[in-house]
Image: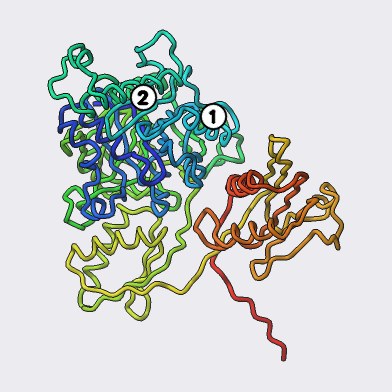
Amino acid sequence: MSNSKITSIIAHIDHGKTTLLDSIIASTGYFSKSLVGSLRYLDSRADEQEREITMKLSPIKLSNGHVFIDTPGHVDFENLLFSSSILSDNHIILVDVNEGITPRTYSLVKFINRDRCVLVINKIDKCSDFETVDLVLMQINGMLGEEVFGWQRNNIVISSATLGAGMSHGTFRFSPKNTLQQAFKTFKTLNAKIDKNDVDQIIKKYGIKFANKKIIFSTVMPLYEAIFNTVDHIYERIDLSVLKPLKIDESSKLNTTDVNEPDWFRIDNELFSVSFENRPSFYGITTYGVLRNRNEFKRENVIQLMKILGGKVTKGDRLYSCSDNEQRYVVLDEIYDFSIDGYTKVISFEGPGLVYVGGDFLKNSIISTEPAVFSLKRVPTPFFCSRLILKDLAKIDDLKSVIRAISFTEQNLKVKLNKFSEFEFKCSGNVQFEKICYDLKECGFDFMTKESKKEFREFATKIAKIKCADASIGLEVIIGPISLFDKSLKAELGIKDQDPRIKFSEPKNNIYCIDGENDNHIIESVLDIFTDSGPVIKERIINTFFYIKSSKDMNIMFFNTLKNALSDLYLQTDPSICPLCLSILFSV
């Protein structure tokens, strides 16, 4: 059965993703609406429940054809957002209205397709004024540089996921005046009536039997209805025909000298590229693996989540599995459809849609009836290093086998055994490593861990500029790699080689150039604080220049604007990370 409406839900940690999905699942009658907000149904791992954070991808398929993927909000699992973006057609980005736009939000929006995204402004029940809602909308549109989200466009939902309540333009039916402000007012009016116990008419109108706040809200303005409505509205504009013929020149053809070779076919987007010499009858992509039986860490127990881009596949088919550096010809052993209840074996599956497959397929690969040239883009680099030392060295081979299975369920993981019989792990962060250790302990291994002393830094890789639109602030900021702070840029800014405005920040090797009419020591302090803990991996920013021009008196508004501008602009410089190296000059 095809399931082509695939939507990933992304958000900063604790903004309400998993609760939103609880509300959607409860709408099917799978469990009581009263459990929404406390059950965290998709957080099925014990450590997820203990930490109260999502640590894996959790896709669910509903009977109406919608598939939703719950994604982690923690920065250590950002690589899983990359995987979910490949598997999905569009996104829901969820923002806690009271916390607003966070630095994490800026890093999340790079995964979305602006034409295929819904903004959910959550926790409306805890928001006292509409100006806060409007500010979130203005900030996220400002961050994207255009008016992506608008109430009249039907790509905004205001919600309280814990109450199971939400409204969109397409589901608002309480007033002829269908505006975002009127929807907010309606929410607050209903809340006030419930608090005053003035709900007799509402209970009668909607046939409500058990009149508590959650039941009333989820009945009068059901959140799931608003979500389905906005996603369906977006899907009316989606072109799923992603594979299109593309004529390429002779020099680009692979392994051939035949100038009469037929046209190639290619998918090339911001996430991956793949080229086929001949159009395949079936093609899909895998980016994530799970254990069919939760506690059995064996490679043969791994099934991979595959997005079928086109065609039909049948158990027993022989298919090519092509990664960026390897190719295999593999038998498709098993096919599993899935639902809220779990996995179901099927004989065949026709796309587009998501399905689990079993077989010796490569991780992160194109699976097709024709050989392909495939490459992923934005491949992350693991920077967290730790060592694991087994107490019983006789179990080294057993641990190798378990790690092989885990390598399919974790992205951005590299492991090697060194000459001291220590397992050296590289991954995205401490929380991901602790998750892996939790699984290894569940498998009965007894071990010690020792974090590597290697440190990392972050730095800008391209120039980004911003000029505050508020004339009363008078602020202009430029950030970029120190290598590009050259003569041409200095000339453009009116800066001389020995200009007293240029200051070097040691030992971070940053350059501050502050062009202001006031005491600039406070601006330097703001820069020192910002560069001590960058927004990407919370490590020092190095080898980066900061140009700040201020023409007005400094006040609280100025410094708030400056701090926000630094965070926003730095993320636009495509920051990268690198290990810290010690440079020593010997003189003999």
Judged from the image, the secondary structure of the residue bearing numbered disc 2 is: helix
Q: Residue furthest left?
A: 209
**Residue at point 28%, 57% (across, down):** 406
Give the side of residue 291 with respect to residue 280, left or right. left
**Which image quarter holds the N terminus?**
top left
- Percent across and percent down for residue 30 are 15, 31
**Residue at point 63%, 43% (across, down):** 557
* Residue with the mark numbered 1: 246
Say which mark, if any, is on residue 188.
2
Q: Is residue 283 visible?
A: no
Three-letter amino acid code at the position of disc 1? Leu
**Which image quarter holds the C terminus?**
bottom right
Callout 1 crowding tier (Cα within 10 Å): few <14, some 14–19, many ≥20: few
Q: Front-most of 25 and 292?
A: 25
Residue 578 sits above or below residue 27 on the image: below
Three-letter amino acid code at the position of disc 2? Lys
Q: Spatial distance from mark 2 to mark 1, Cα to Cα?
A: 54 Å
**Residue at point 42%, 32% (across, down):** 128
- Percent across and percent down for residue 583 are 63, 76
Residue 301 sits above or below residue 176 on the image: below
Q: Front-most of 325 and 256?
A: 325
Q: Front-most of 249 and 48?
A: 48
